[in-house]
Amino acid sequence: MFIRAYLRASTSEQDASRAKSALDVFAAERGLRFAARYVENESGAKLHRRELFRLLSDCEPGDVLLVEQVDRLSRLTSPDWIKLRNLIDAKQVRVVALDLPTSWILTAPTDEFTGRMFAAVNDMMLDVLAAVARKDYDDRRRRQAEGPAKAKAAGLYKGRRENKTRNAPISSLLRNGRSWRDIMDTTGCSRTLLAKVARDRRRQAEADAAISDAHP
């Protein structure tokens, strides 16, 4: 049996390895050693995550997938959660989470009956916590959307402010006639951001031209 730790954070600004010490303590208390740790910054609402799928690919039957909380593994919709569970079951991987005490016994040798009983209970609790994690995710997104919606209704919402420090060099390179590929390679910006800056420059140029025509 190999222990494989999965550590995830939703965005690049967050520390995906934050829970490492908690997982290390859990393993040390039980005399367990990690075969590998898999760390990534991806949304738990996304099914196809590179490190998670690499972990599962590396697993052999009986290996343990260790997470701090079930929501680190899944904030998936019900159909996507079923797909992930089917893959986990097909690989015969045991999911152990620090916030799911019924799963802890899966890291210790047991007789067949006890092992099957706890595995069944753990599967049920895992499904429940995965459903709760998804609900929390949906609730948070709804609350985040309600703020701007209320502000718009009150006429207070002005949208996201432009990041002028980030956009200035992009605009300058556009003004100098550099190609989009060259600009993306130079600044590291995405094509979506580049298109937005180019569109804003065109609109500003059109506005300036209109003002000039109105006041010759």
Image (tube, rainbow, N blue to C red):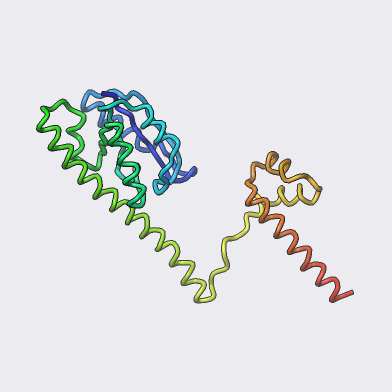
Q: How many marks?
A: 0
Give residue 196's position: percent from left, percent from top.
66, 56
Give residue 23's position: percent from left, percent from top.
30, 33
Residue most toward the right? 216
Residue at image point 29% right, 48% down: 130
Which residue is nearer to you in this view: 87 or 155?
87
Please state if 16 lies on the left or on the right of 63 as rendered. right
Q: Judge whether 160 appears above or below 12 on screen.
A: below
Residue at image point 71% right, 42% down: 181
Give residue 32's position: percent from left, percent from top.
25, 24
Please state if 75 lies on the left or on the right of 171 as rendered. left
Q: Which quadrant: the C terminus? A: bottom right
Please state if 175 lies on the left or on the right of 161 as rendered. right
Q: Judge whether 215 appears above or below 120 on screen.
A: below
Give residue 141's position: percent from left, percent from top.
41, 59
Residue at image point 60% right, 60% down: 161
Please state if 115 lies on the left or on the right of 184 as rendered. left
Q: Judge whether 66 appears above or below 175 on screen.
A: above
Q: Which quadrant: the N terminus? A: top left
Which residue is nearer to you in this view: 86 or 175?
86
Quadrant in the picture for residue 187: top right
